[in-house]
Amino acid sequence: MPTKLLLKIVAVLTLIGLLIYFNYTHLKLHPDQIQRTMLSFGIWAPIMFIVIFSLRPFVLFPSSVLAIAGGLSFGPVLGPLVTYVGSLSGAIVSFLVVRKLGGRLNQKEWQGRGKSLQKNIESNGFYYVMALRIIPVINFDFVSYLSALSRISFYKYVGATMLGIIPGTLAFNLLGASFVDLSLHMILLTTFMFIVALAVPVIIRKVMKKKNIDIDLLPDEHL
């Protein structure tokens, strides 16, 4: 491996480590804290929320916490909308940045388990990325990074992400909204959405097996 490429990889890993440290030492925020901060922006709150969600991948802040905060801040209608736009924007921005910075890496053939992952992303890109967005096998941002370092087309990646993030976005936003609205219909709606969010991965996994796309090649741990 060329020295320059090795140094780039070390630099990126170091930066990620520093961001994780910063997240756990300085960004220990809860959804209600984010809600208060968001609402302080008044009419600009939805736009600010989308901007923050778009930049979230670069500080490695948990997307689920921010999604719950979206439901708390904006309710069960506007909340899912702004969270969806923000989440999609963040996935697109992180993909483009990593693809630009890691241009040489996506021309190389990965080894070991990564080789199988690379093959699946590139040969079954749309279905594979969509499944990874729906099935919580691997970290949301890591999916973006891996996709960027593969040869999947940008448009397939975006399309798969647009569909794949819907169940989780709705489930976590309704959960956040239910903290404010404790009515029976909201509780039932939230429960139903989580059941759907849990059922969809099972269906997706069966469909992928029929298409001979091996989702089980991924590690069992959440990365």
Image (cartoon, grey):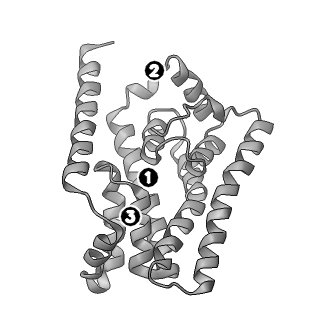
Check the picture and name the quadrant holding the C terminus. Answer: top left
Identity, as a three-letter code, of the amino acid under mark 1: Ala
Residue wearing tag 2: 108
**Residue name at image x 73 percent, y 40 percent:** 208
**Residue name at image x 38 percent, y 52 percent:** 93
Q: Nearer the viewer, residue 162 or 29?
A: 29
**Residue name at image x 53 percent, y 52 percent:** 158
Decide which of tag 3 and tag 1 comes sooner along the chain: 3
Residue 119 is situated, as x and y percent measured from the top left of the image, at 60, 27
Q: CA distance from mark 3 to mark 1?
A: 14 Å
Give above or below for 12 relative to 135.
above
Residue wearing tag 3: 66
Identity, as a three-letter code, of the amino acid under mark 3: Leu
Task: State the image quarter where residue 188 is shown.
Answer: bottom right
In the image, is 93 to the left or to the right of 154?
left
Picture mark count = 3
Secondary structure beneath label 1: helix
Decide which of tag 2 and tag 1 comes sooner along the chain: 1
The dot on residue 91 is 1
Q: Nearer the viewer, mark 2 or mark 3?
A: 3
Q: Nearer the viewer, residue 102 or 57?
A: 57
Q: Nearer the viewer, mark 3 or mark 1?
A: 3
